[in-house]
Image (cartoon, rainbow, N blue to C red):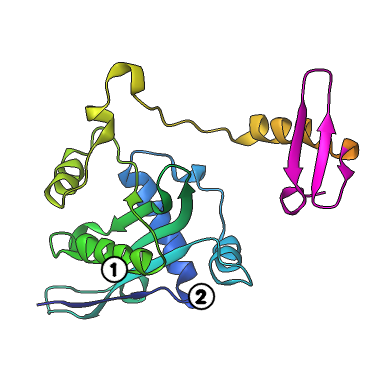
Amino acid sequence: MASYVIRQARIEDCDVIHQLLQEFAVHEKYDAEKITNTIKGLKRDGFGERAWFHCLVSECVSYDKNMSSLPHNGVVGFLVFYYGYDAWQGKLAYMSDIFVTEKHRGNGLGKKMMQQAARISRGAGCQKMQWIVSEWNVPARNFYKRIGAEDYTDQEKEAHRQHYIVLDGKDFNSFAEAGAKYSSSFASSSDMNKIKDNRCEVQLAEELIMQ
C-alpha cells in the first residue's frame, strides 16, 4: 500500500510541477504547447521576493511492489492557488490548477490538498475559495458538489449568468499599450494622479501607476 504526504511545494519541486502541468494539459484535452510558463518563471513567481502563487504537492513516500517505478521524484499531484479580492465579499482564494496523476487517483489526494488550501486561505482571512472546472469533467463536478461547493453556472438565471472571459496574447499587449499612451498625461498631486481625455477624468492612486 502506498503512503502519501501533503506538503507545501519547495523551489526544487518546480521542475516536477512543470512536467505535471504538461500532463495536466493533456488530461484537460489541451495542447501542452499552450503552456508558456517556464520552470524559471515558476521559481521566480512562486518562490521569489514576491510570491504570486502558493502551491501544495502530494508526495508518495512509500509504495508497494506493484509500482515498478515512481516518476517525478515521488510528487504525484499538485494544487496551485492565490489570493484575490471580491469587492462584495472581501478576500478570496482562487484555485487555478489541481491535478493528480492517473495511477494515484482514488486515494483522496485531491480532496486533502483542497482541504489544506482552504485551511491556509481561511487563516489568511479569505471568505471563500473558487475555481473553474471543464464542462466534460462530470466526476470532478460531482465531487465538488459532494464537498458542498456550488456551481453558480447552473444556478444563475440567464440575465445574471456569468461567463469566463480571458484577454491574452497580442490583444492583451495592444490593450495594455493603449493604456500606456496615457501615462505621460498623469499629473501628480499630493496623493492622486489624474488623466484626462476628451470624454472623462480618471483618478488613479499613485501606487497603482506603473511607468
Which quadrant would residue 70 be assigned to in this image?
bottom left
Residue that protrudes farthest toward the left in the picture: 1
Q: Magenta stretch: give its range.
A: 186-211
Q: Is residue 181 visible?
A: no
| Direction from residue 33 to residue 188 in the image, left or right | right
Crowd class of label 2 (few under 14; some 14 to 19; many from 20; radius 10 Å): some
Residue at screen point 70% across, 30% down = 175
Amino acid type assigned to the residue bearing label 2 in the image: Ile
Which one is nearer the viewer's eye here, 41 or 19? 41
Q: Quadrant of residue 194?
A: top right
Of residue 150 and residue 32, the one placed in the foreground of this image is: 150
Q: Is residue 177 visible?
A: yes
Q: Which mark is residue 11?
A: 2
Q: Is residue 201 left or right of residue 57?
A: right
Residue at 24 percent of width and 64 percent of height: 115
| Quadrant of the drawing holding the N terminus | bottom left
Q: Secondary structure at mark 2?
A: helix
Q: Are marks 1 and 2 in contact (CB under 8 Å)?
A: no
Residue type at numbered disc 1:
Gln
Q: Position of residue 88 (x, y in %)?
A: 43, 42
Q: Residues within 10 Å of mark 1 (few under 14, many from 20)?
A: some
Give residue 10's position: percent from left, percent from top: 46, 76
First in sequence: mark 1 vs mark 2: 2
Residue that mark 1 sits on: 116
Who is closer to the viewer here, 178 or 9?
A: 178
- Nearer to us in this view, 51 or 191: 191
Q: Residue at x 64, y 72 (%)?
A: 49
Give percent across and percent down for residue 57.
34, 69
State which quadrant residue 79 falls in: bottom left
Q: Vertically, is 44 above or below 141?
A: below
